[in-house]
Amino acid sequence: MRGFTLLELLLVIATITILAAIAIPVYSNLQVKNDLDVATNTTLQTLRRAQVLSQTVDGDNTWGVKLQTSGISLFKGASYAGRDINFDEDYSLNGNVTPTGVTEVVFSKLLGIPNTTGTLTLTNTNSEVQNITIGSKGQLDY
């Protein structure tokens, strides 16, 4: 006779259950950490893009970035409220990431100097933090 006994099947099912119970929380933590890394990179790239567009005087205007809980907006204009909505570029943030600190930065034409300095903080649901510092001369550090 060929086949498996009930005891063998139960042992295999128990082993798979134990492995899944260990792997699922580890995977969840890695996913939340990855969401924070993606949000940090997207924010930095958007800030640098706004700075470069301002330095090249693209559209003969200043460019800026507005950070909201739902996402990041690259805009053309002196402020988010007075922007030209035809040039908006929006990027979404994962719901696991919450931004705090500096929420709007506009870079000057030609020099790319920000109108505000400070720290932009991104926090995930595991309370891990990434800080992006905007310097007075336009340097972006994280």
Image (cartoon, grey):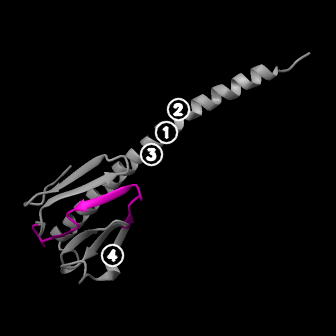
- Residue 66 lies in what quarter of the image? bottom left
Q: Circle 1 — which element? A: helix
Residue pointed to by mark 2? 22
Residue at 59% x, 29% y: name it: 18
- Residues at circles 1 and 2 in contact by the CB criterion of under 8 Å: yes
Residue 83's x, y, as percent?
A: 26, 81
Residue 141's x, y, as percent?
A: 17, 51
Spatial distance from mark 4 to mark 3, Cα to Cα? 29 Å
Residue pointed to by mark 1? 25
Residue pointed to by mark 4? 88
Spatial distance from mark 2 to mark 4, Cα to Cα? 44 Å
Residue pointed to by mark 3? 31
Name the residue furthest top.
1
Residue at 43% x, 42% y: name it: 29
Range of the magenta residues? Answer: 91-111
Numbered label attached to residue 35: none
